[in-house]
Image (cartoon, rainbow, N blue to C red):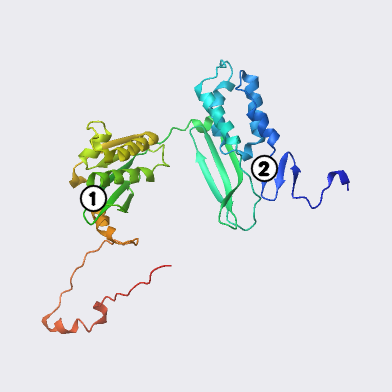
Amino acid sequence: MNPSKCAFGVTSGKFLGFIVRQRGIETEQVKIDAILRMPEPQNIYELKSLQGKLAYLQRFISNLAGRCQPFSRLMKKDVRFQWDEAFDKAFKSINSYLMKPPVLVALVPRRPLILYITAQERSVGIMLAQKNDKVKENALYYLSRMMTLNELKYSPIEKLCLVYFDGASHKEGAGAGVVFVTSEGEVLPYSFTLTQNCSNNIAEYQALILGLEIVVDAKQLPLKVHGDSQLVVNQLLGLYEVKKPELFPYHNYAKRLMGWLGDVELEHLPRKDNKQADALAKFTSILSTTDKEACIPIYKSWVIPPIFSDDEDDTFQEDKNHVMEVFEVEEED
């Protein structure tokens, strides 16, 4: 045993170029400072130097391949090196991330793992995490890579999601209904009890915003949104002017969400064609008088009355086969 290479009773130390502490594994600050002090690359050799330093820290950087994706154009042969706004934005994004790099923790055996996956147009990335004793998620590992040319040859399948929204408001409460119809034809209804009294127009905006927030993670999915509020739809299409001050925040937020999602088509339709969302909105507006959440199942059924003879009228109540028993269900904890 070489005493110069051994240490006992220490709380932290350097191992393979990383700092190992009781709370986890950290990057060596000198490695981060070397990147932060680098100016913007002026040629291909400086860019390769930057990418080499980043590759050493790849397990600490979330979706590194996606962050470096703009640089790939400059790495091609016969491409003139010209630093533009897209490269500058990517460079600053990496530097901003490294100002506060994550601390990776060691794997705890027999504890569930959590896998996060991110997919962009030209890169894929994952993060492996675990919850600690305080039920807080800690990152274990980051991994990302650029997609190959063969993978990029697959043409994206154009899928369209239909969204129907409606809001309802009256003196006793307000509600919002949103119905999604996926490209596979699956119908996903959502209903919301609005916790504040509001006008019917605000309830309509609330319904639209709630629907957009639900699909905010599906940025690449084209949406076709239908609503029966001519005012809300035409205000968002720019055909009507927003005059009431109380509508400005909702109008601006809805426009921002639609802009972020990108491919959103908004269309007005008659109320008779928006029955599902309308029914959900009206139903939940009635439930707004209670503070408890309600879970109300809806079943498809049709009762066919049995045919009785005259002498069977008095025996119906005695026949247990015809009796439906109803029990009170205890509330879940």
Q: Residue at x 77, y 50 (%)?
A: 10
Nearer to the camera, 295 or 325? 295
Nearer to the camera, 133 or 215? 133
In the image, residue 288 lies at what x, y percent? Answer: 28, 58
The reply, left or right, for residue 55 in relation to residue 85 is: right
Which residue does the numbered mark 1 point to in the structure image? 168
Quick one: label 1, few (<14), some, or many (20+) residues within 10 Å? many
Which residue does the numbered mark 2 point to in the structure image? 26
Q: Quadrant of the C terminus?
A: bottom left
In the image, residue 27 lies at what x, y percent? Answer: 67, 39
The vertical placement of 102 against 197, above or below, is above
Question: Closer to the N terminus: mark 2 or mark 1?
Answer: 2
Question: For the image shown, how many numbered marks are present on the structure?
Answer: 2
In the image, residue 186 lies at what x, y percent? Answer: 34, 49
Disc 2 to disc 1: CB gap under 8 Å = no
In the image, residue 267 lies at what x, y percent? Answer: 25, 37
Q: Secondary structure at mark 1?
A: strand
The reply, left or right, for residue 143 in relation to residue 308 is: right
Q: Secondary structure at mark 2?
A: strand
Residue 205, visible in the rendered structure: yes
Q: Quadrant of residue 315?
A: bottom left
Label 2 amino acid?
A: Glu
Q: Quadrant of residue 222?
A: top left
Say the numbered circle drawn on residue 141: none
Nearer to the camera, 53 or 301? 53
Q: Residue at x 27, y 75 (%)?
A: 324
Label 1 amino acid?
A: Ala
